[in-house]
């Protein structure tokens, strides 16, 4: 019996999603942002993107204030620079399903600028960094 790949969800409008290549540009341009990885902690320990913050999907609700204060801190650090842009919030997971659920929830909770990285870390490994380990 052949394993079917997991269903790709499509929960968000396109303006609430960015590609892994677009996210790479954001990191290269050093745009102020926070990357939340919503995978379980044991997955995060295997491999993660630099400077990402592990907030497993199951704990998202209880850690909203943490996300809020990190975004505020990033904005305060940016005040001294020419850039007036607010720190963006991006969410990633393994394949791009849980991150969409997380962004949907974050939008409901008032984090309206939150964006999902389409295809998650698998897309990053495929399109951005072929040396990025997948599991």
Image (cartoon, rainbow, N blue to C red):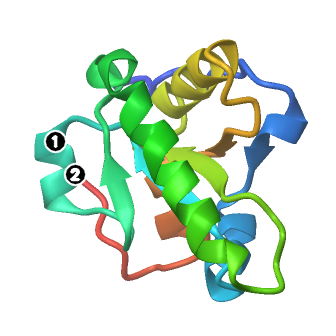
Report x, y in % for residue 89: 62, 48
Residue 88's place in the image compared with 60, above or below, is: below
Q: Is residue 110 left or right of residue 40?
A: right
Residue at 65% across, 70% down? 32
Report x, y in % for residue 19: 72, 56
Q: Which residue is mark 2?
A: 44
* The quarter of the displayed image where residue 126 is located: bottom right
- Kind of element beneath mark 1: helix
Res. 95 in view: no
Residue at 47% across, 67% down? 125
Tag 2–tag 1 contact (CB < 8 Å): yes
* The quarter of the displayed image where residue 46 is located: bottom left
Q: Which residue is mark 1?
A: 41
Point out which mark residue 5 bears: none
Q: Is residue 29 left or right of residue 129?
A: right
Q: Is residue 42 left or right of residue 124?
A: left
Badge 1 crowding class, 10 Å Cα cut-off, few under 14, some 14 to 19, many 20 or more, is few
Residue 75's place in the image compared with 115, above or below, is: below
Front residue (pair 125, 83): 83
- Kind of element beneath mark 2: helix
Residue 131's place in the image compared with 104, above or below, is: below
Q: Is residue 88 left or right of residue 126?
A: right
Q: CA distance from mark 2 to mark 1?
A: 5 Å
């Amino acid at each position: 019996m052949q394993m079917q790949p997991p269903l790709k969800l499509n929960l968000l409008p396109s303006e609430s999603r960015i590609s892994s290549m677009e996210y790479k540009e954001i990191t290269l341009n050093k745009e102020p942002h926070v990357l939340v990885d919503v995978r379980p902690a044991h997955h995060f320990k295997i491999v993660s993107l630099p400077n990402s913050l592990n907030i497993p999907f199951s704990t998202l609700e209880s850690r909203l204030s943490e996300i809020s204060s990190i975004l505020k801190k990033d904005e305060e650090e940016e005040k001294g620079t020419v850039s007036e842009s607010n720190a963006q919030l991006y969410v990633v997971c393994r394949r791009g399903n849980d991150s969409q659920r997380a962004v949907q929830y974050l939008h409901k909770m008032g984090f309206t600028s939150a964006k999902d990285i389409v295809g998650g870390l698998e897309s990053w490994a495929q399109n951005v960094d072929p040396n990025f380990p997948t599991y």
